Image (cartoon, helix red, strand yellow):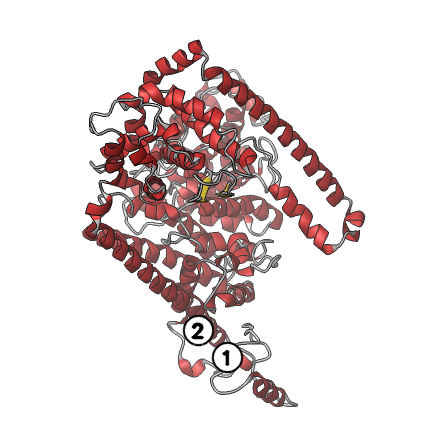
Amino acid sequence: MDIDSVSCEKSISQVDVDSGIENMEVDENERKEKRNLSDKELSSGSEEQALQLNPKEVFSDFKDLIGQILMEVLMMSTQTRDENPFASLTATSQPIAVAARSPDRNLTLNTGSNPGTSPMFCTVGSFGASSLSSLGASGGASTSDSYSDHFAIETCKETDMLNYLIECFDRVGIEGKKAPKMCSQPGVSQFLSNIRSQCISHTALVLQGSLTQPRSMQQPSFLVPYMLCRNLPYGFIQELVITTHQDEEVFKQIFIPILQGLALAAKECSLDSDYFKYLLMALGELCETKFGKTHPVCNLVASLPLWLPKSLSPGSGRELQRLSYLGAFFSFSVFTEDDAKVVEKYFSGPAITLKNTHVVSQSLQHYLELGRKELFKILHSILLNGETREAALGYMAAVVNANMKKAQMQTDDRLVSTDGFMLNFLWVLQQLSTKIKLETVDPSYIFHPKCRITLPTDETRVNTTMEDVNDWLMELYGDQPPFSEPKFPTECFFLTLHAHHLSILPSCRRYIRRLWAIRELNRTVEDLKNNESQWKDSPLLLLRILDPAYPDVTLPFGSDVPKAFAALPEFYVEDVAEFLFFIVQYSPQVLYEPCTQGIVMFLVVMLCNQNYIQNPYLVAKLVEVMFMTNPAVQPQTQKFFEMIENHPLSTKLLVPSWMKFYKDVEHTGATCEFYDKFTIRYHISTIFKSLWQNIAHHGSFMEEFNSGKQFVPYINMLINDTTFLLDESLESLKQIHEVQEEMKNKEQWEQLPQAQQQARPSQLAQLPISPWPRKPWTCSTFSRSRSRSHSSDRNLDPN
C-alpha cells in the first residue's frame, strides 16, 4: 500500500488514539537493534525525533510494521516468566483477561447480546459482554467436572500469546463499530485488514508451536477452550481457516487437534446441561466455513482415519457409533441406557411430580431439537461440499447397513447403535428429505446394482420368495439394464426410509415393553399397599417374639434362643433381608420414610445376636444389607446408615459381635466355604472402616483391643487372609505373564488349536488379581434346609 509520509504519520497517530494500542516507551538504541535500522545511524536525540522517521524508509508497507510489532510483543512475552507485561493491553475482552489472571484460569461461557449469536462468530462488541457460568469451575455452578479439562485454559506462554492476538483482532472490530465512516476509507480499511491478517498469521504460528516448542497433531489444541466457551471474536475462525487451508500441512497441524478436541469433549457431554450444543455449534460453523465453493474443514473431516472405520467385530453398529468421528456428536440422548445422567438429574428423587415431569420433558425435547438442528448443519455442509458428498453418502449408508439387526424382534443391543443415536440420525435424514419431490425418486433404486443399501438375505418380501426375486433380478440385469445413475434425491429418500425402519419402530417396541413393565410394577405396588397390614409389622413381630418387652429391648439377649423364635420359618427373616437389599439397590429414597425406625431396630438386633440364626449365610445377607447402605457404596442411603451406626445398642455391641462373626465365618459348613469367607469378610472390613470414622464406636474398638477376646482372633485371621490373597495375586500375575508371552510369539500361538486360543483369554479374565471382590457378594437363594443339613450347597454368586 503506497501512502505518503504525511498520511503515514496521520495513520499512525490515528491508530494510537483509536485502536487502543498504547505507545510503549522504548529506548532508542533498543528500537534500532530490534528493527535493524543499521542503514540510518540515529543520533542521540529524543524519542520524538526517532518517531518522525518516514516508515516507508524502514518498512515496505504497514503489513511489515504490524508484523514486527506483533512479533516483538510475542517474543517479549515468551521471555517473561511472571505476569505478562502486556496484560494492560488485553482489556477489551473481559472473559479472557479475567481468566488469564485467575488462579484456576477457566474461561466463562459468553452468550453474547443476541440469542441467535454463534459461539465463535459472535456480534462485534459483544465479546466478553456477559457470561452464564464457569464451564470449567469446580464449584456448584458446574454441572459436571468432566467438562473442566476441555474448558480450562492451559497455563503456558502460548495462552498469553493467544489472548493478546485474539484481543488485537477483536479491537479491530470494535474500532470499525466506533468509527464506521472513517474505517470505510480505503487506506484505513486496508490498514485494519492488515492487522486482522497479521493477527491470524501469528495465531497460526502460535498454534503450531513455532514461537515456543513444536507441537504434534496428537497434542490438544489451545484454541478449543475458546471455541467451546464462545470467546472468539466475529470472523476469527473463518479467517484462520481461509488463511491456512491452502497450505495442507499447516492446515492439518492446526485443525486436526481442534477436531479431535471437539470429538473428545462430545464424548463426555450430556443432555443434563445445555453445554453439549456449543460443541455442535462449533463443529457446525467450522464445516460451514467455505472458500469459494470449497469447505476446507469438511474435506479435513472426511479425510480423517476414523471418518468411516472398518468393522472389527459382529457389533458393527455399536463400533460405528463409538469409533467414527461423527458418532460422538450423534450420540446425545435422553434414554437411560444411553445416558444415565439425564435420568439421575431430572427424573429421580421423591419430589418428582407429574407436572414437573411434563415441564422437564418439554425442556429435553427443546434440547434435542437444538442439537439435531446443529447435526443437520454439519451433515448438510459435508453434502454440499462436492469433494465430500460421496464420503457423506457412504457414511449414511454404513450407518443403515451396520444396524440392520435393530429391525429384529430380539436384538442384542451390544451389537447395534443406541436408540438415541439412530433417532438423531433419522431426524437429520428427514430434514434432508423434506424438499425431495417424489417424481425425482427412482422407485427401483433398491434393485439398482449401485444401491448403497444391503438388504439381509432373509428379508421377507411382500408377495414373493427369495428364489423368485433372484430369478427376476437376473433377468433385470440383462444385456441392457433399465437403470440410470442414482441421483442424490433417490439415495437420500431410500436411506431415510430404511433409517425409519431401524430407529422409530424399534424404539416404539421398546416403549411398549417398558409400559408393560411399568404396569406390572404398579400392580405389584398396589398389591403391597393392599397387603400392608400383613408385611409392615413382620420385623416388629419378630422382635416381640425375641423380647416381649419390645420396644424397650435390652441387649445382649441370653444365650438360649427362645423356642418360639427358633421354630419360625427361616424365610421370615430372609424375606426382610432380600426386600431391603432390593430397596437399597433400586429405590433407596424409600428408606427415608418414618417406618424405617423399626427396620433399623430389627437389623441392629439381628446383627448383634448372630447366634440366634443358625444359617451363617443368612447373617451374611444381613451384613451385606448394611454394607450396601454404606455411603461409600450407596450415597443415597447415608441417613439410614447413620441411623444404624448411631443406634445406642449398635455403639455397644456391633463391633464385638461382628469380630466374632468374622472368626465364625471361617467354617460355614458349605462346600465353598473357603472362598465365601473372603467376600463376607470384605463386607465386614468395609463397614469397620466406616464405623471407625464415627467417634461413638471408638470405645467398643478399644475395649475389644484391650480385652483381646475377639480382637486377637480377628487380627490373626485378617493377616492370614491378606497373606493368602497376596500370594494368590502374585501367582495370578505370573500366569497372566506366561499367557501374554505365549500370545506374543505369533508363530507358536497360531499353532495352538482354535479352542485353546479362545480359552486362554477367558482364563486371564477369570484370574483373581485383586485381594477383594470388585462387586458386592450376593446370595441369590438361601437353603431352606440349612438347619437340617450343614453340607447343603449354597447358590452363591461372588461376582
Q: How many marks?
A: 2
Q: Residues within 10 Å of mark 2 (few under 14, many from 20)?
A: some
Tell me the SS state at disc 1. Answer: loop
Residue 16 image offset from top left, x and y in percent: 38, 31
Picture disc at residue 497 = 2
Determine if residue 124 is in view. Answer: no
Q: Nearer the viewer, residue 736 or 367?
A: 736
Q: Nearer the viewer, residue 375 or 597?
A: 597
Residue 249 image offset from top left, x and y in percent: 62, 47
Determine if residue 724 is in view. Answer: yes
Farthest residue, direction top:
706
Q: Eyeballing the image, is 197 above or below 468? A: above
Q: Nearer the viewer, residue 607 or 207?
A: 607
Q: Eyeballing the image, is 485 above or below 250? A: below
In whole angstroms, how far apart are the C-alphas of marks 2 and 1?
A: 16 Å
Q: Give the amino acid type for the residue marked by disc 1 in the picture.
A: Thr
Residue 45 lies left or right of residue 37; in this view the side is left
Q: Residue at the location (27% across, 21% down)?
A: 648
Residue 645 image offset from top left, x and y in percent: 32, 25
Q: Which residue is mark 1?
A: 460
Q: Residues within 10 Å of mark 1 (few under 14, many from 20)?
A: few
**Which corner quadrant of the image does residue 108 belong to?**
top left
